[in-house]
Image (tube, grey):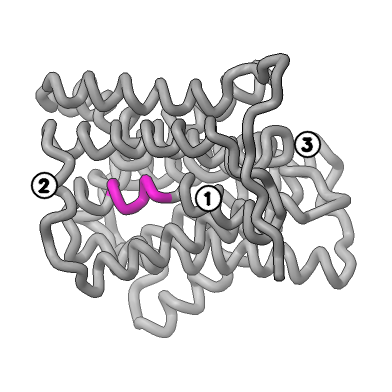
Amino acid sequence: MTAIVVKLVLVAVVWGGTFIAGRIAAPEMPPPTAALIRYVTASLALLAMTFAMEGGLPALDRRQWLMVTLLGFAGVAGYNYLFMVGLQTVPASRGSLIMALNPAATMIGAALFLREPITIAKIVGTLLALTGVAVELGGGNPLALVSGEIGEGELALFGCVVGWAAYTLIAKNVTGLSALAVTTYAALIGMLMLAALVVTRGDPLVPHASLRVWLALVYMGVLGTALAFVWFLEGVKTLGPARAAIFVNLVPVAAITLGLLLLGERLTVAMLVGAALVVAGVWIINRPASAMPAPAIVLHHP
């Protein structure tokens, strides 16, 4: 259990670093092309890991093919396309707050479709972590992030939230495959979907870019996708979708911290308070179970 929690914290740190890498790559490369190169790199890394650790990709039955195809669509191609559309018009801080709804969406989805109980700890932890993200990104005023109108960009980012929640819930139901095999298949399928998107748009498959951009994309592919996705799926299988997803709320904390260390961004009191709230929310949800069972709400299908 402790090892899984450590891995999920490291996943949040790595994903926080992808925001830094993305800022490096964005000015020199079309977003769909950058996403495709990221997943080409990730797929190669995942294939190397799969052959080294498991001797290759296993054969899939019809149900498993359906599951990994849905994962590739929801968590790779669909998520990345909507993410790029959203950030064309939505400021990063406002978009990050929308993305911080991932754990809440996953918790609700797990209750509706997997019949996981919604405990008081999950509700309190999720609300506390989300409040921390709002305080941190709003500069101490969470209402500043929700005062604008909802436009096409915001709707696209809400679609990202749905896509990632779907990815997490579907992954929980994939049986007979390791997290590495599931991640590799999903990345390969999503990569093909992204390639089709790039070709349809007429974007260059191999654009000219500086060395630092290529290094940033390698980081995003190898660490931010290949390694992080495998560890995240291990967390989903061990802790369940709702508890694993709450670690996503650590990503803004990691991104701001790395921005402070690597880009010289300013540290504020709001950042410290928000980070403390996020960490507290994650701890509440993932603390060791007490001897007395926590009250829970179970949503049943009609």
Q: Is residue 211 visible?
A: no
Who is closer to the viewer here, 286 or 221?
286
Check disc 3 and report the residue beneath it.
52
Relative to 87, is 141 on the left or the right? left
Q: In which quadrant is the N terminus drawn? A: top right
Q: Could you classify mark 2 by the number of other residues whose Cα lies within 10 Å: few (under 14), some (14-19), or many (20 or more)?
A: some
- Front position in the image: 174 or 37: 174
Circle number at residue 144 = 2
| Residue occupied by mark 1 | 41
* Disc 2 residue type (three-letter): Ala
First to last magenta residue range: 96-101
| Disc with the residue nearer the chain's start (2 vs 3) | 3
Q: Is residue 98 magenta?
A: yes
Three-letter amino acid code of the residue under disc 1: Thr
* Residue 148 image position (x, y, % from top left): 12, 61
Q: How far apart are marks 1 and 2 (CA)?
A: 38 Å
